Amino acid sequence: MDDGFFFSGVDDATIRRERGKARDLRRTRWWKNKIAQRVCHYCGQVTAMEELTMDHLVPLARGGRSVKNNLVPSCKECNNLKKTMLPMEWEDYMERLDQQ
């Protein structure tokens, strides 16, 4: 899998398997409790539960896994902006936006 910026070395079968694990976790009480707080992990905005998405802090394409300590609720806007950034890349991106 090559997105033009980096080669992740993560194969499609692994990504499919991890997405399946994430789907299973969405149905758990743990996830329902996370989204019940209604807060986006990235921007801190209160958001309707239905509008929150599950985001991998370390994206699957970058070797992340679908485990509880790698999954956070995110508003759709932040999730779309973050794409495959690692947490430190996201922080740098947000700092650059603040400086503009």
Image (tube, rainbow, N blue to C red):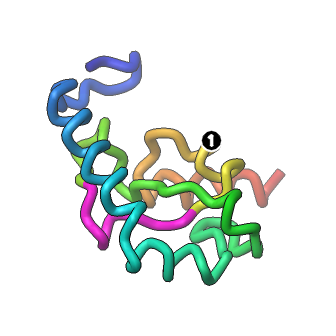
* Image x and y of residue 29, in percent: 40, 78
The quadrant holding residue 2 is top left
Q: Which residues are magenta?
A: 66-73
The residue that appears at 25% across and 33% down in the rendered structure is 16
Residue at the right extreme? 100
Q: Is residue 82 left or right of residue 27?
A: right
Q: Is residue 67 magenta?
A: yes
- Residue 11 position within the rendered picture, expressed as x and y whole percent measured from the top left: 16, 26
Using the image, determine if residue 65 lies above or below residue 11. Answer: below
Q: Based on the displayed image, in which of its 4 quarters is residue 60 positioned?
A: top left
Image position of 83 (left or right of 61): right
Q: Is residue 25 above or below residue 96?
A: below
Looking at the rendered structure, the secondary structure element under dot 1 is helix
The residue closer to the viewer here, 76 or 42, is: 76
The residue shown at (48%, 51%) is 89
Residue drawn 25% across the image and 64% down it: 67
- How dense is the environment of label 1, judged by Cα within 10 Å: few (below 14), some, or many (20 and up)? few
User: Which residue, given by chain and number where applicable, does mark 1 sit on?
Assistant: 80
Q: Amino acid at mark 1?
A: Asn
Quadrant occupied by the N terminus: top left
Tally of numbered tags: 1
In the depicted view, which residue is nearer to us: 34 or 91?
Answer: 34
Q: Residue at x 25, y 25 (%)?
A: 7
Q: Is residue 4 magenta?
A: no
Q: Position of residue 70 (x, y in %)?
A: 33, 64
Q: Position of residue 20 (x, y in %)?
A: 27, 44
